[in-house]
Image (cartoon, rainbow, N blue to C red):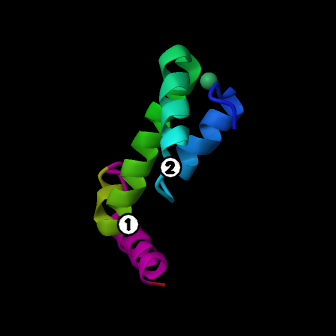
Amino acid sequence: MDIVLTCREASHLMSQAYDRKLGLLERLGLKAHLLICDACRKVKHQLDLLHRFSRKVAAEPEALLDLQPGLSAEAQARILKELHRVRDG
Ligand SMILES: [Zn+2]
C-alpha cells in the first residue's frame, strides 16, 4: 500500500477502523490523508457521529425516541419492541 492514500482507500480504512484495529502504516496513511483532504475529514466526522449514535442506540434503544418527540406512545412502544428484538437477536 502506498503511503499516500486515495480518497477511496481512506474512506475504506475509516470504515474498517470501526471493525478492527488498523495497522501502524494504515493509521499513519489515514492520518496523513486526513491532514491534506478536507472532504475526507468531513466524511470521517459524519462517520464518527453515525457510529457513536448507532452504538448509543444499540446500548439504549430509548435514545432513538429522543429524536422523534412527536410519536404516539403506541408507536414508541412498537419501535422500542422492534429495536430490542433486533438488538437481542
Ligand atoms: Zn480524501
What is the x, y in percent for residue 84?
39, 78
Task: Decide: is 18 above or below 11.
Answer: below
Q: Is residue 88 left or right of residue 30?
A: left
What is the x, y in percent for residue 26?
55, 41
> Ligand 1 shows up in which quadrant of the image?
top right
Task: Decide: is 66 above or below 87.
Answer: above
Q: Is mark 1 within 8 Å of ligand 1?
A: no
Q: Label 1 is placed on what type of residue? A: Ala
Instruction: Give the residue at mark 1.
Output: 58
State the image quarter where residue 58 is shown. Answer: bottom left
Magenta region includes residue 86: yes
Determine which of the numbered discs, if any, sits on residue 74 in the image. Answer: none
User: Going from the N terminus, do you reach mark 1 or mark 2 first?
Assistant: 2
Q: Is mark 2 within 8 Å of ligand 1?
A: no
Q: Residues within 10 Å of mark 2 (few under 14, many from 20)?
A: some
Residue in the image at 58% along x and 43% along y: 13
Q: Secondary structure at mark 1?
A: helix
Q: Is residue 30 left or right of residue 2?
A: left
Residue in the image at 42% along x and 41% along y: 48
Q: Label 2 is placed on what type of residue? A: Leu
Task: Decide: is 66 above or below 3.
Answer: below
Residue in the image at 50% along x and 49% along y: 22
Q: Bounds of the magenta span?
A: 67-88
* Quadrant of the image containing the N terminus: top right
Task: Decide: is 55 above or below 84.
Answer: above
Residue in the image at 51% along x and 59% along y: 19
Determine which of the numbered discs, if any, sits on residue 22 in the image. Answer: 2
- State which mark lies toward you, 1 or 2: 2
Label 1 to label 2, Cα distance in Å?
Answer: 24 Å
Q: Nearer the viewer, residue 65 or 41?
A: 41
Q: Secondary structure at mark 2?
A: loop
